[in-house]
Image: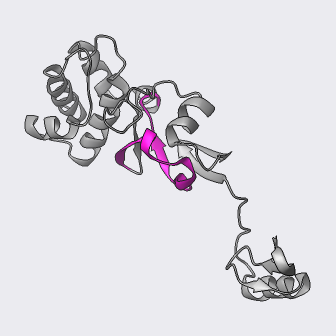
Amino acid sequence: MKEASNQYLCPYCSHKYQSFDVLKTHVLEAHAGEPAPQPEGLINLTVNGEKHQVHVESQWTLYQLLHDQMGLLGIKMFCDRGACGSCTVIMDGRPILSCMTFAIECDGVVIETAEGIAEANHPLVDSYVKHHTMQCGYCTPGFITTAKALLDKNPEPTEEEIRKALSGNLCRCGTYPQHPKAVLEAAEHLKGGK
């Protein structure tokens, strides 16, 4: 990569060289065997078990990548301020707000969305339906992904632990009392109780 003043920048270590030939020698000697650097904006990530290599713009959020570019419509945008939880996805085992995460920072991560949870026939989906935890349904994917991250980390949560884990998710319809019931039932099912 050429810089101003006829200097050449090493794409591996950012050292500057006065000629391309010197840069080429440096790369062959100092960086032999290293994988080629990726072009800016190109990331690799795994989404719902599938590997993807995608080009992202530096200003895109993870929400924009997953929802707008990859078509995962279960991820919702309600507040766009990190306050409602409707855009929650699981990244490397943790629930995160996709509207507050830059896509460019997600190289090498594993993402799980509500679609992936449903495709895996996770018992949360059936228990959420059974316990009427949704009315309009807009917040449901965020609640389910948050609850799944909790159950992955703590397979036998108390009702208080469930309420605390879900406290960052807002529901316009007020179905809050039903969520702990649904999560507790899914936990029982996961350990073979139902």
Residue 193 seen in this snapshot: no
Residue sitting at x 15%, y 40%: 164
Between 90 and 130, which is closer to the camera in this rendering?
A: 90
In the displayed structure image, the side of residue 30 where residue 168 appears, left or right: left
Q: Is residue 149 visible?
A: yes
- Residue 141 percent location from the top left of the image: 37, 26
The location of residue 83, given as percent across then percent down, is 31, 36
Quadrant of image for the C terminus: top left
In the displayed structure, 94 sits above or below 169; it is below
Q: Which residue is pictured at 16% across the width and 36% down the height?
A: 162
**Residue 109 included in the magenta stretch of the image:** yes
Q: Is residue 107 left or right of residue 13?
A: left
For residue 135: magenta? no
Query: What percent of the width, then of the height, locates residue 168?
Result: 25, 37
Position of residue 185 in the picture relative to residue 90 (left or right):
left
Task: Determine which quarter of the picture holds residue 28.
Answer: bottom right
Q: Which residues are magenta?
A: 93-115
Q: Is residue 34 above or below residue 21?
A: above
